[in-house]
Image: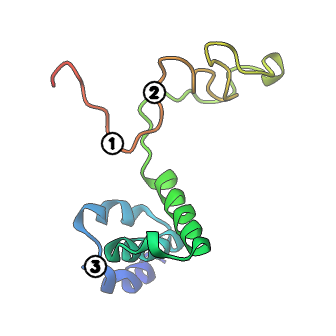
């Protein structure tokens, strides 16, 4: 399967900016196809001139790619169920217990998914 992927995508390798090669290599075949469409539209800078429905589809596909391949987990992710969701059927005032698998996700002073690796601010 990898051989087929590489043969099909080899002609597009030079079309894709070198900064994206590592991310594209991790994508599924369908997501690579979506990426090529999005990347082509971005290079032409025409997405804002598309008809509304096509513009919405473009934005939805772009969002999908960002969520799958561009958000980096910068906090600790516990494994397994940490609490019983029935005990906390609501979000607490400090934002805890929003996610049954990670009670700290979305709480005050917590990190969230980013598209850039965090930088130590003390060194900057």
Q: Residue at 59% across / 30% down in the picture?
A: 79
Residue 120: x, y in percent? Answer: 24, 25
Q: CA distance from mark 2 to mark 1?
A: 12 Å
Q: Residue at 15% across / 25% down in the picture?
A: 124
Q: Is residue 20 above or below residue 113?
A: below
Q: Residue at 36% across / 60% down in the picture?
A: 23
Q: Earlier in the sequence, mark 3 or mark 1?
A: 3
The residue lying toward the viewer, choosing from 101 and 43, is: 43
**Residue on which disc 2 sits:** 111
Q: Is residue 39 above or below residue 69?
A: below
The residue lying toward the viewer, choosing from 19 and 90, is: 90
Q: Which mark is residue 15?
A: 3
Q: Earlier in the sequence, mark 2 or mark 1?
A: 2
Q: CA distance from mark 3 to mark 1?
A: 24 Å
Residues marked 2 and 3 touching at CB (< 8 Å): no
- Apparent side of residue 21 relative to residue 60 in the rendered image (left or right): left
| Disc 1, SS | loop
Q: Residues within 10 Å of mark 3 (few under 14, many from 20)?
A: few
Q: Earlier in the sequence, mark 2 or mark 3?
A: 3
Residue 100: x, y in percent? Answer: 70, 28
**Residue on which disc 1 sits:** 116
Residue 48: x, y in percent? Answer: 45, 69
Q: Is residue 32 visible?
A: no
Q: Is residue 107 visible?
A: yes
Residue 1: x, y in percent? Answer: 49, 78
Q: Is residue 8 above or below residue 110?
A: below
Q: Residue at 25% across / 69% down in the picture?
A: 17
- Apparent side of residue 7 relative to residue 96 in the rendered image (left or right): left
Q: CA distance from mark 2 to mark 3?
A: 35 Å
Q: Which mark is residue 75?
A: none
The residue lying toward the viewer, choosing from 98 and 54, is: 54
């Amino acid at each position: 399967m990898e051989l087929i992927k590489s043969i099909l995508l080899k002609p597009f390798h030079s079309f894709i900016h070198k900064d994206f090669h590592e991310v594209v290599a991790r994508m599924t075949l369908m997501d690579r196809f979506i990426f090529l469409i999005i990347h082509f539209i971005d290079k032409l800078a025409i997405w804002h001139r598309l008809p509304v429905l096509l513009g919405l589809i473009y934005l939805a596909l772009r969002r999908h790619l960002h969520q799958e391949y561009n958000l980096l987990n910068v906090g600790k992710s516990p494994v397994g169920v940490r609490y019983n969701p029935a005990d906390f059927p609501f979000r607490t005032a400090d934002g805890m217990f929003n996610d049954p698998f990670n009670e700290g996700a979305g709480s005050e002073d917590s990190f969230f998914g980013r598209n850039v690796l965090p930088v130590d601010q003390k060194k900057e």
